[in-house]
Amino acid sequence: MHRNTEPWVLVLAAGSGTRLSELTRDQDGIVVPKQYCSLRGGRSLLLDTIDRALRLTVRERVVVVVAAQHERWWAPQLRCIARENVVVQPENRGTTAGILLPLAHILECDPDARVAVLPSDHYVADPLVLLHSMQIALRAVQRDPRHLVLLGITPDSADTEYGWIVPGVRAGAGLQSVAAFVEKPQLARALALLQARALWNSFLFAADAGTLWGLCARFAQQTATAIRAASRRPTGERDLALSAVYQGLPTIDFSRTVLGGSASTLRLLSVPECGWTDLGTPDRTAECLADIALRHPNRPVRVPWHATVDLAHAVARLEPTSQSA
């Protein structure tokens, strides 16, 4: 029997996006996680991410991790994804658990899986550039499954709100090792990093699923063991088992703890400028919208899909003078 070698894509959509809360309140004053909002009308950021995922693999291999408390937003937006591939976290226990839970599902389906990880709250002006880099990363993982390949974004400014990655030595096939991570540097340090051709940490990466599980388990053994045991329970018992497990899990940050402690296992791929942003702050969102307006001056702002909050309208309400100038 021919084995399906298509990669899996794991879409991370369980975050609350609290840093953008002043823009993402709906008409009832409820904060909508930014991945369920539209940037300039039309589809949500989550659905834009799923569109990118479907350019990397088949629909049956797209897995989305969401939060139980966000069901009012993800239920109508994820009708395009098979229900078994919508993995629901009962609580937030950090990004390591947020990766391990859907990864357990993928490994049960395909022990030899290659996985591309895509956060769902990013904007990409030129997605083809980003997707081409991810395809290169997936091929690198196929050649050598021992290494996790990070996508580093070529910066266009000395941004002090991003994490940065300092490249190390060349590691073949266009890859480099990772010399260091620098989280939200002061301006002088950010300027030096820009001059030294350091890259922005995008939290986009490709990995062999087994290798990724092993990396997480090295720093979060209790979490990995408990999640895998609960995930293997019969369907009718799984939700209750996971709820009980999550109540006792520590909160472990994937970037700081797992990536920060695994430099020798990491490889870095530089992504050419592609208009990427993580929309992490209101100011950055406003800058992104201004850039979109310059690139597409005749594109109308449409009614948001499924009546999600539209960030363009929200920014206009906050800055009426600057938006009308």
Image (cartoon, grey):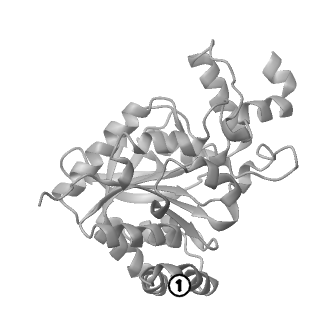
Q: Nearer the viewer, residue 64 or 262?
A: 64
Q: Tell me the residue at 60%/47% (across/down).
A: 77
Q: Quadrant of the N terminus?
A: bottom left
| Residue 272 visible in image | no
**145 relative to 212 in the view: left or right:** left
Q: Which residue is label 1 attached to?
A: 237
Q: Tell me the residue at 68%/42% (across/down).
A: 37
Residue furthest front as drawn: 236
| Residue 145 visible in image | yes
Q: Position of residue 11 (x, y in %)?
A: 48, 54
**99 relative to 312 in the view: left or right:** left
Q: Nearer the viewer, residue 242 or 257?
A: 242
Q: Tell me the residue at 16%/56% (across/down).
A: 143
Report how many numbered discs are placed on residues in the image.
Answer: 1
Q: Tell me the residue at 66%/24% (across/down).
A: 290
Q: Quadrant of residue 61?
A: bottom left
Asked if 2 appears above or below 248 in the picture, the reply is above
Q: Nearer the viewer, residue 241 or 31?
A: 241
Q: Nearer the viewer, residue 26 or 154?
A: 26
Three-letter amino acid code of the residue under disc 1: Glu
Q: Position of residue 272 (x, y in %)?
A: 38, 34
